[in-house]
Image (cartoon, helix red, strand yellow):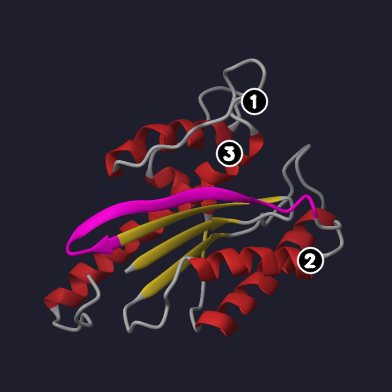
Amino acid sequence: MIIVGLDVSTTCTGYTIFLIRDGKTSVVDAGYIRLNKYDSSDLYGKANAILEQVLDFGPYDNGCMQHIFIAEPLKRFARGMSSAKTINLLWRFNGMLCMAIHERTGIKPTLIDESKARRQFDIKKQFKGDNIKLRAYEFTKCDIKNYDYNIEWEFKKDGLAPKPHFLDLSDSYVIAKYGLGELINEISENRALNTLPGGCI
């Protein structure tokens, strides 16, 4: 079973892929897709670039359950971080991507409330004005080692803060792991009911 987590934006999209096979869970890939080379108005080109990367995560036609979780766009204004135009653009782009993924793979992506996912892993601001994305990065940097997966993190000139695209990667990891937990709970219930498809795990 393949679980894909995406943190979607129009400039850079982070992704994380979990694989469950023979009862073992592992991270098989984690990275980011830079979309800067596309014109800011070329949402179709950007969505297609993400879609092609998602298709590489397959195959999706082996009869097993496949799941794609996407961080839900902002629902409200965040001072200094969002505007009505930005929120509208993100929802439009997110919708385009979800539809494209469904048309090409048959999978209906699940939107995940990013705040809810962070709370699940006790990721929170530590002081007023703190950057929650840095806290997600710290969690990811530590937790992903449990799956024997190493990331060559790149940092800003100060040598402390990771470069922005690695924050997108970290957010995608939180989304993927939250979705993974939800699926494991569902699988446990289905096993108890003897409704789990065979050969998938």
Tag 2 secondary structure: helix
Membership of 23 in magenta stretch:
yes
On the image, the x and y values in percent for residue 166 come to 57, 38
Marks 1/2: CA distance?
Answer: 32 Å
Marks 3 and 1: which is nearer the front? Answer: 3
Marks 2/3: CA distance?
Answer: 22 Å
Q: Which mark is residue 115?
A: none
**Residue drawn 76% across and 57% down?**
87
Of pointers 2 and 3, the one earlier in the residue sequence: 2
Q: Is residue 122 visible?
A: yes
Q: Amino acid at mark 1?
A: Gly
Looking at the rendering, in which quadrant would you find the N terminus? bottom left
Membership of 35 in magenta stretch:
yes
Above-or-below relation of 152 to 186:
above
The residue where tag 2 is placed is 43
Q: Amino acid at mark 2?
A: Leu
**Residue drawn 63% across and 77% down?**
100
Q: Amino acid at mark 3?
A: Leu
The residue where tag 1 is placed is 129
Q: Quadrant of residue 133?
A: top right
Above-or-below relation of 59 to 85:
below
Tag 1 secondary structure: loop
The residue where tag 3 is placed is 167
